[in-house]
Structure formats: C-alpha cells, structure tokens
Image: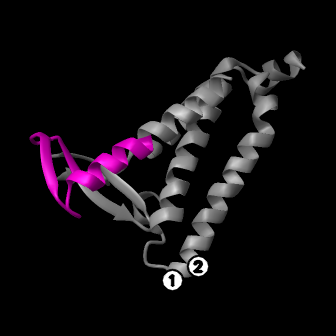
C-alpha cells in the first residue's frame, strides 16, 4: 500500500504542477524564483534525460519512449512483492519510480514530449530542466540503492 500511495501522490503532484506551468507560462518563459540559483520555466523535452534522442525521428522516438516506460512499469509491478519482502524502503522506491514513470508517460501520450519546468543553475553551470516525475524517479532510484546497501543480497536470501 505504501507504494500505491507514493504512485498516486507523484502522479497527482506531477500532473498538477505541469498543468499550472502550462496555464501560466508561455513556452520558454523564465521566472526567477531564487536569482542566481533557481527559475521556473516552461519547456518540453521530446528526448530522455538531458535531451537524449530528442533529435530522433518523431514516430520512432515516441514508440521507443512509450515502450520503455510501459516495460519499466510492468517490471516494477511484477517485481513488487519480491522487493517489498526485502524491506519497506523498496516499497517507497518502487512507488516513487512507478509514479514518475507514469507521470512522464502521460505527458508523452498527451503531448509527444515531457513538460519540464524546474530550472537550476549556479553561475555558468546550468542543470537541464526537469519536473516532479523526474525528481521522484531520482529519489526512488536513490532509495533503491540505499536499500540494496542496507539489505545486501545475502541478507535478503535469509528473509526468504
């Protein structure tokens, strides 16, 4: 149930924040929040993280990214019980990762690209814009790694 809660929270927050940005910002508009560190903006990313494959042909890119997202969600669904027996941290991780994957999948199906709006930079260093779904996936992967360190495979074998 933990993971279902996270999945729903992430999807709702992700889609609500994207809807607010799309309703209140023009494409490429920038609104400083913390000058020198953080802006809100409205961008779309047809590629993956950091714009990977953004230049690929539209149809194949869309099929590829939708397919990868669906495959990831299916793998998470079928591995849920196995991982959650290993510790609650994995339930949190799976919920966050799945919620982020679904949030970005919704964008790809609706718009053919993912809406990004969180824009961090420091001096001349600029991190690529991202969204709530991306953040949830990143935190979920971090929790998964932490869980793997706290509950290594030999420890997990004892739980079976």
The stretch drawn in magenta includes residue 28: yes
Task: State the residue lying farthest toward the left.
Answer: 35
* Res. 123 visible in picture: no
Q: Which residue is painted at 17% across and 59% down in the image? A: 29
The structure residue drawn at horizontal position 56% and vertical position 40%, both measured from the top left corner, is: 99
Q: CB under 8 Å between callouts 2 and 1?
A: yes
Q: Nearer the viewer, residue 143 or 158?
A: 143
Mark 1 crowdedness (10 Å alpha carbons): few <14, some 14-19, many ≥20: few
Q: Residue at x 45, y 57 (%)?
A: 49
| 117 left or right, relative to 115 | left
User: Which residue bears the numbered disc 1?
Assistant: 57
Look at the picture and state if 38 lies above or below 30.
above
Check disc 2 and report the residue beneath it.
60
User: Which residues, given as a range, are shown in magenta?
Assistant: 14-40
Q: Secondary structure at mark 2?
A: helix
Q: Nearer the viewer, residue 154 or 68?
A: 68
Query: From the viewer's perspective, is 137 left or right of 145?
Result: left
SS at badge 1: loop
- Considering the image in quadrants, where does the N terminus appear? top right
């Amino acid at each position: 149930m933990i993971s279902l809660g996270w999945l729903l929270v992430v999807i709702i927050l992700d889609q609500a924040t994207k809807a607010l940005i799309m309703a209140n910002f023009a494409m490429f508009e920038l609104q400083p929040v913390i000058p020198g560190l953080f802006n809100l903006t409205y961008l779309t990313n047809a590629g993956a993280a950091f714009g990977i494959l953004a230049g690929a042909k539209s149809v194949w890119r869309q099929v590829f990214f939708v397919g990868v997202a669906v495959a990831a969600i299916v793998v998470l669904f079928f591995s849920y019980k196995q991982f959650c027996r290993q510790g609650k941290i994995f339930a949190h991780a799976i919920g966050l990762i799945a919620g982020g994957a679904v949030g970005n999948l919704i964008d790809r199906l609706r718009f053919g690209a993912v809406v990004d709006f969180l824009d961090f930079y420091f001096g001349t260093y600029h991190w690529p814009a991202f969204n709530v779904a991306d953040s949830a996936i990143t935190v979920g992967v971090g929790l998964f790694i932490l869980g793997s360190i706290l509950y290594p495979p030999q420890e997990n074998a004892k739980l079976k």
